[in-house]
Image: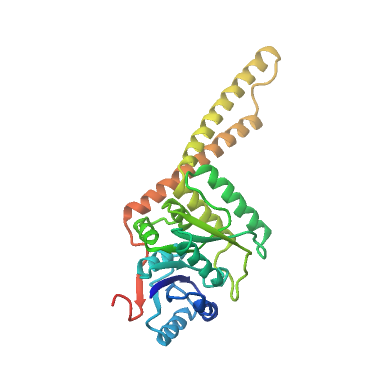
Amino acid sequence: MKIISVVVPCHNEEKTIPLFFKETEKIKKDLHGYQLNYWFVNDGSTDKTLDVLRNLNSTDPERVHYLSFSRNFGKEAALYAGLREANGDYVAVMDVDLQDPPSLLPVMLSGIEDDGYDAVGARRINRQGEPRIRSFFSKLFYLFINRLSNTEFVPGARDYRLMTRQVVDAVIQISEYNRFSKGIFSWVGFNTKYLEYVNQERVAGTTNWSFWQLIHYSIEGIVNFSEKPLAIASYVGLSSFIVSVLAIIFIIIRKLFFGGSAYGWASMISVILMIGGIQLLCLGILGKYIGNIYLETKKRPIYLIKEKDNQIDK
């Protein structure tokens, strides 16, 4: 019997884990000839998430596994840890809040087994239930990054996907510290199909992602998968220089032929602020890339495990 491993990152999800497990177990009858096993990753939760995982593991230690980090390392680290540990013939990545419908898993399996795809992912066709400002910036992000990056980013695509062992092994090979899974899944290639579905709201609890965390995550994605912001910074600097030269020429001609003033506190401050702002923008872009290089050269581990269930590594 082939195994489908389900990797589930968890951060303060004590209420949603039992609901997720119950709902996912319902699809076993639709997975003829396949066995589900679970790899929950506790990403430094401060509630009773770890206790819930321990109890769940004690009821079915052969199929339910867990890892617990020494602190919160972030969802990207949790995904990477789960993928490294998962031992299934196929591996699925799912969110525990049931915004990723488990009912799609049999359809994903059919896409791989019957249609010959290497991976089948899920993409939302709407963002119903989300604040409009978040939806607006999400659309803007996909528009922006697809113009900047050579890696294709599918609008509305979730981390939710089912992958063959070959695809999982390829993703694991990318061991960079600054991770952006949506980009990594696209960058490794392979034949991928996306299933469309209507957005689902969380079954319990609140999201761990604030608006500014999502903005930061988007910036990480752009920096990790495009060098074009560096080129843009150069173009902005060059444009600023040209505009400044033209402005100086204009002021000199006006003074010589029309008697206008070439002096003025306001004009001087405006030019200084314009040039200074552009310089700071360019330095900020450059600094972000240098910061990522700095973190990569340290070779720090992506995560540290404090506790595993007894079945892991046996």
| Residue in the picture at 36% in, 55% down | 174
The single residue placed furthest to the left in the displayed view is: 314
Whether residue 161 appears in this view of the structure is yes
**Total of numbered circles in the picture?**
0
Left or right relative to 43: residue 154: right
Screen quadrant of the N terminus: bottom left
Q: Nearer the viewer, residue 309 or 170?
A: 170
Q: Position of residue 29 (x, y in %)?
A: 51, 79
Left or right relative to 260: residue 236: left
Left or right relative to 193: residue 264: right
The single residue placed furthest to the top in the displayed view is: 257
Left or right relative to 91: residue 298: left
| Residue in the picture at 45% in, 48% down | 225
Q: Position of residue 307 (x, y in %)?
A: 35, 77
Q: Nearer the viewer, residue 59 or 215?
A: 59
| Residue in the picture at 62% in, 17% down | 252
| Residue 274 in the image: above or below residue 222 | above
User: What colouring style does the render use?
Assistant: rainbow
The single residue placed furthest to the front in the displayed view is: 114
Q: Position of residue 286 (x, y in %)?
A: 45, 42
- Residue 314, quarter of picture: bottom left
Whether residue 73 appears in this view of the structure is no
